[in-house]
Amino acid sequence: MSLVDRAKNVIMTTYGTFPIVFDRGDDVYLYDIDNNKYLDFTAGIAVNALGYQDKELQNALIEQIGKFTHCSNYYYNQPSIEAAELLVKASGLDRVFFSNSGAEANEGAIKLARKYGYLNKGEHCNKIITLLQSFHGRTLGALTATGQTKYHKGFTPLIPGVENVLINDIDSLKNAIDDTVCAILLEPIQGEGGIYPLHQEYLEEVRKICDDNNIVLIFDEVQTGIGRTGEIFGFQGYNIKPDIVTLAKGLGAGVPIGAVLAKESVASAFQPGDHATTYGGNPLVTTAAKIVLERVSQKEFLDHIKSVGQYLKNRLEDLVVKYDYVKEQRGKGLMQGIEVDLPVKSVVSKALDNKLLLTSAGTNVVRFVPPLIVKEEHIDEMIKILEVVFEEVINEN
Ligand SMILES: Cc1ncc(COP(=O)(O)O)c(C=O)c1O
């Protein structure tokens, strides 16, 4: 029996998985078990920041495995302290809680904001405002925060006290503000929802509303964080500092880690016993985070992302000019999307047939989130394949 058939027998059918089994990666390429080579513009969904087989990351992980990989949070371990110090230094926030995923980071942020509201205004102050079209993860709190009903179907009742408002619409937000609101949670650039950047003026007003009403501003930077937009954090591109930031994906560059960062006055709402996770910040995953943060914090690395990000943007804008079915380019740095008047699922699956890994976002957006080490030549290679894919999709329809 093939591996794909064996998988179909035993793995839950939660994903629309393609019938391909990957075996190894190298640089920005993945190889399947038949040794076919794929150009990777998905990067494990904006995860594999350093590409594949990064020697420094590999060696650090091997060395750590040789020592120990876990000891619980009853005790400290050096890699987690160092990774937290790097996060604090890079963000200007004060404290870190390590989780294991993005959804779990958002759960932690929601709990922290509620505890802050409870301590500062009372039990009634527990409402979280999030945006329509947003995506915050699949656990129940994060799922409720996710402003897309298609993800909610079959899982009600969701958690009480979450309200969605329109993206980039300050009046919609203002109408939802009252003394029950403890936090506003948003992605600076919506990822899964279809690569929609929030507007500068909008975020400035959101910051002011939070300041005026003692509301906690939470940025979900699970996708935008750790260099993806050309800054270490997406918020740095807006020059607007949130009170809490959630991270995951690129932070571990392939090992599962998430984090909640918070400023002191908010972080101190958590007291011993309030929040925990067994694996959180173990020395294996924080060793990876440390290497990633050291690398991504280098000016040359961020300059590289900005420069190739601009190149990718230009090449995608060219497609908007060239093909009338490519409607719009959106995004920042190496988080880009094009809105297409084509069946986006066909684009993604034909790309796969042509050995290019792409993913979609929203209903009609092709998303490009390659490893952060991608070069211009890879972008040229990708565009060349994409043009063939467009032609195949058009011919088929
Ligand atoms: C912005 C955002 N938040 C949260 C999540 C959930 O992260 P995870 O899948 O690690 O739970 C995602 C995943 O795509 C995301 O893009």
Image: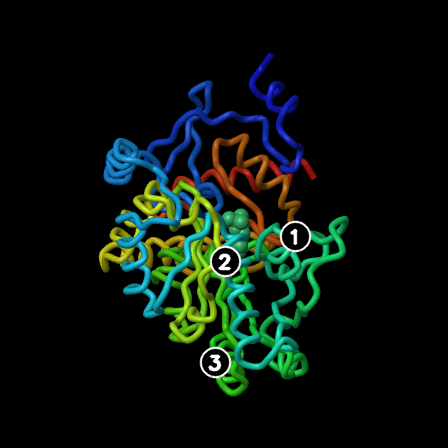
Q: Disc 2 vs disc 3: which is toward the camera? A: 2
- Residue shown at 27% from the left, 47% from the top: 291
Horizontally, residue 35 falls left or right of residue 182, namely left
- Is residue 101 visible in the rendered image? The answer is yes
> Which element carries disc 1, helix, strand or loop?
loop
Q: Which residue is mark 2?
A: 275
Q: CA distance from mark 2 to mark 1?
A: 36 Å
- What colour scheme governs how the chains and residues are painted in the rendered image of this protein? rainbow
Q: Which circle marks residue 204 in the picture?
A: 3
**Residue placed at 50% from the left, 52% from the top?**
102
Contact, mark 2 vs mark 3 (Cβ under 8 Å): no
Kindly identify the amino acid type of the residue bearing the numbered disc 3: Glu
Secondary structure under the numbered disc 3 in the rendered image: helix
Q: Quadrant of residue 175?
A: bottom right
User: Which residue is disc 1 drawn over?
Assistant: 363
* Of the two numbered discs 1 and 3 in the rendering, the one whose residue sits closer to the viewer: 3
Q: Is residue 27 above or below residue 115?
A: above
Q: From this view, report whether residue 38 is shown above or below residue 192.
A: above
Task: Residue type at mark 2: give it.
Answer: His
Circle 2 SS class: loop
Q: Quadrant of residue 65?
A: top left
Q: Amino acid at mark 1?
A: Thr
Q: Quadrant of residue 57?
A: top left
Q: Is 267 rendered above or below residue 340?
A: below
Give the x, y percent position of residue 97.
41, 58
Where is residue 34 drawn, in percent x and y?
46, 18
Image quarter hosting the C terminus: top right
